[in-house]
Amino acid sequence: MPAEPHEQPALHLLAAAPSETELRATIAKLVGFGTRHTLSDTRSDTRGIGAARRWVKARFEAISRDCGGCLEVITPSQTFTGKRMPHPAEVMDVVAIKRGSADPQRVIAITGHLDSRVSDVMNASSDAPGANDDASGVAVLIEAARLLSKQDNRATLVFAALSGEEQGLYGGKLLADYAVAHGWQVEAELNNDIVGNSRGQNGVRDNTAVRVFSEGTRSNETLQQADYRRYHGGEVDSPSRNLARSMAGLADQYLPDFRVRMVYRTDRYGRGGDQVPFLEAGYPAVRVTEAQEDYTRQHQDLRTEHGVRYGDTIDGIDFRYLARVTALDAITTATLGRAPAPPSAMDIHGALATDTALDWHKAPGAAGYRVHWRDTTAPQWQHAQATGDVDRYVLKDVVIDDWFFGVSSVSSDGYESPVVFPGDAGSFERSPPAATQR
């Protein structure tokens, strides 16, 4: 029988595993450093970004000891200047790497940013607890590292606490540059930023959903690629968008009390996050953010005005909600890390025909493939057919003009890759930066 995805008991166990106690302890520790502003003190052991970075590094090292040294902990750094960094300053990321057993150059990354801020983005001295923005994201990736450290992964897993986000997305750029320099084949970057609050500023509470933002067209497609896409389709089928679809499907299957709200944008309107430098480097990436935001707790001086408390303090965190976000990240990372890579060089044929033919290059470690298709206005894949271990398949009586198509890889133990859309628009392979293409 052709290999097909099937329900994984291990993912059910993983979905229930995140600890609210662990998440609370991490956020409390990070808040306790007073401020984690990128330009704050780097020498103190009790206050500032330096103390916070060293604590995260020590936490990763402790997790590594518990799994027999399974994590390699690195601290890549670079000096930046810019509009929000008028003088040269070091930006350092704290990264834990769990090498893949079968496909170590393929990388699945979870990120969150360690730095915090108050109303004035240049104020590096005032208390900036940053409980939700973004100690919550750092807590997610540390807990995911703890849970996944003793489990098998065929692809490499990366857990990265980034710095410099508030000053210009420098931490994301630093890690994306590191990935390029080391030849990483980044299949997915899950950027967790503001993921711990379930009550909006308007009083609306939603603890059953999380938003996943994904770009529609690749950030660095060439003019020639854009012309082809505009004619043949692909505006809603970037690799990042199909990564988001995979996350939504996993939530439906393994998190019955939690769902993914796919948002067809790279980020919140007029705002940005550390997934953007990954997209600019040609890698698939999404942003994970809570369903309801409270703006009185974002980028605010600690104060009370007209009975309203401002500031990003730990009492604004819903830890049960944060545990569900952590579960989503963990099962997504585990699935992608155990599944084969998506097939490459996927193409379709069928002009002036009543059948549609699909072909692709096989992925290492895949036991079989599935062909997917959906109505051109449908948000999710609607139909699928297992094909066996082949690199070409013909869908009889399915007209190419009326549907969008894709292919996924399946492992022998039933883990499935994201769906890849045909052509450059949907490829999960890294595309060169735009500056080198034009």
Image (spheres, helix red, strand yellow):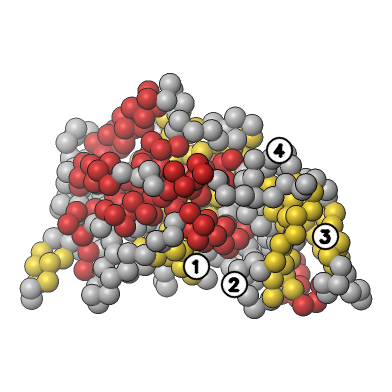
Task: Report the side of 374 relative to 351 (left or right).
Answer: left
How far is mark 1 from mark 3, CA to CA?
Answer: 27 Å
Which residue position is annotated with label 1? 262
How far is mark 2 from mark 4, CA to CA?
Answer: 29 Å
Which residue position is annotated with label 3? 358
The amino acid marked with disc number 2 is: Pro
Residue 285: % across, % down: 53, 55
Tell me, yes or no, whether the two marked residues, 3 and 4, touch with CB atoms within 8 Å: no
Residue reaching furthest right? 352
How far is mark 4 from mark 1, CA to CA?
Answer: 30 Å
Q: Earlier in the sequence, mark 1 or mark 2?
A: 1
Crowd rating for badge 2 (residues with CA inside 10 Å; few <14, some 14–19, many 20+):
few
SS class of the residue under badge 2?
loop
SS class of the residue under badge 4?
loop
Residue 14: % across, % down: 44, 44
Which residue position is annotated with label 4? 365
The amino acid marked with disc number 1 is: Met
How far is mark 1 from mark 2, CA to CA?
Answer: 9 Å
Which quadrant, please, contains the C terminus? bottom right
Which residue position is annotated with label 2? 379
Q: Earlier in the sequence, mark 1 or mark 3?
A: 1
Q: Earlier in the sequence, mark 3 or mark 2?
A: 3
Residue 402 seen in render: yes
Residue at x 79%, y 53% (from the top left corner): 387
